[in-house]
Image: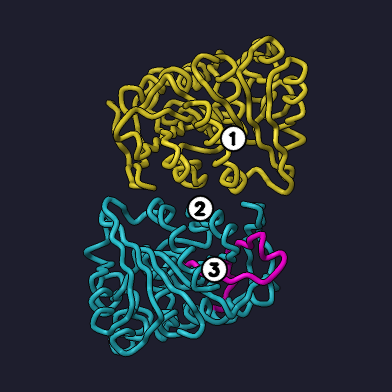
Chain colours: A cyan, B yellow
Amino acid sequence: MSLEIVSQARCFGGTQYVYRHQSEATGTAMRFAAFVPPAAETEPAPVVWFLSGLTCTEENFTVKAGAQRVAAQLGLVLIAPDTSPRGEGVPDDPDGAYDFGLGAGFYVDATQEPWRAHYRMASYVGEELPAAIAGLLPVDVSRQGITGHSMGGHGALTLALKNPGRYRSVSAFAPIVSPLDCPWGEKALGGYLGPDRAAWRAYDSCALIEDGARVPDILVDQGLADGFLDTQLKPHLLEEACRRAGQPLTLRRHEGYDHSYFFIATFIEDHLRWHAERLG
Amino acid sequence: MSLEIVSQARCFGGTQYVYRHQSEATGTAMRFAAFVPPAAETEPAPVVWFLSGLTCTEENFTVKAGAQRVAAQLGLVLIAPDTSPRGEGVPDDPDGAYDFGLGAGFYVDATQEPWRAHYRMASYVGEELPAAIAGLLPVDVSRQGITGHSMGGHGALTLALKNPGRYRSVSAFAPIVSPLDCPWGEKALGGYLGPDRAAWRAYDSCALIEDGARVPDILVDQGLADGFLDTQLKPHLLEEACRRAGQPLTLRRHEGYDHSYFFIATFIEDHLRWHAERLG
């Protein structure tokens, strides 16, 4: 399958696309959403990646966050990948749980059977898809920023920390900051990477910072009425890791906001402006 | 059942609610979404109604239009009702078609069996629900505006034209302007109101204007890449009816925009500002 357009729609003077292509990394067909702002008609635009959370596809952010308005104003291309491989032959959580397998790729390259053949979302999102869009869309790939929500916030932070030259800016909404230290993370990394927790450190924002990874600065927003705050997200762990390491972090806590897209929609403008300032 | 909160979430400094209550008009439990802006904490706020299109519930507008940002700025309460009665004993289209029955109430009070017991969306949206929110939310019911999309644009225009004292402002996105003159309308009004087309005129914007109904002004946005433009929507019929009657109309046609929420999201700010100016 070559790259094909699944849908396209005019939106805030730009175009919202959904594409489908065959991924070498995952060995499956993958979908992603791409918003191209009006400014990209005349010169290549910087790119902001949005990585979504558990159960999401490329659609959730695209239809719920209201990001296109701001991206159109700022001249940003937005890319929203899917959250896991899908389709025939792709194994899912044996119990069909929402927090592992389909919709829950955790932005890692799995090393364990039966996951390692398809669950290679780190390579897909970090390497294959940027190369694919570089040949497809009017993007300046020297100017990429990355953000995400929950599992996708974890993905954004870890990809940026592991590839500081690739992303000029990074932020997150209610991210899982330490898979080593929460039930979602322990299940996912235990399954995809196996029981050796030392191997998990390459996919744990706090551990990466502890082990010396650095980015210029990080913006994180977190709602204080988020039902996953204390059990899964634990932003204080990131705060402590950054303080100990001297890693600049702007962590904003918001009274009353939960884990939903109403929270993301409220603060997406701040994030896109943060990225635009750093992407030039 | 008394009125109950199904969900609530902080959003742009206000609160997005979904409520459920027992409707006397429809004889069923009904859901509606209500956004309350920060300004309504200190004094009653004007209300803008959004009536949704075929297949929608109270959710589509609420999660896809990005309207809360603007409503928070302008101090508007937003109410999004469901599009039909639902639940046990509510008949649906015999073939399960999307354009009649569930999700397709067309904002009429049905007179025909088996529809007339429950399909009373004109009374529900126009009378019962305004009274219900007046006792529930910090709203100034003397300042109401109404808008909607497609079937809901038809609902907004007809409710406003039939009740000019009730709504101070009216607009629509890609409305069905004449059910008398399109397949969706002929099926729906034929089913709910029976074969006498004279009875349909009370639910046809063009016929209402022809028969003397007036509002101060109307704003309509229409995408020119809308797949339903020529077969179902036919904005030129409204344009002609308004011109002949001297009814003020601002009809904006937008190159490249389709029938989706990407179109609504792009222009919702213009509509809410139009309503806010007229609601004071």
Q: Are marks 2 and 3 on the same chain?
A: yes
Q: Chain of mark 2?
A: A
Mark 2 or mark 3: which comes first in sequence? Answer: 2
Q: Residues within 10 Å of mark 3 (few under 14, many from 20)?
A: few
Q: Which residue is mark 1?
A: B149
Q: For the magenta stretch, what is the residue range?
A: A26-51
Q: Which residue is mark 3?
A: A87
Q: Chain of mark 3?
A: A
Q: Which residue is mark 2?
A: A66
Mark-to-mark CA distance, 1 and 2: 18 Å
Where is residue A230, by image quadrant? bottom left
Give residue B146's position: percent from left, percent from top: 52, 27
Report the amino acid beneath label 2: Gly
Q: Chain of mark 1?
A: B
Please report the residue visible at 42 percent of the width from the left and 19 percent of the height from the top.
B142
Q: Secondary structure at mark 2?
A: loop
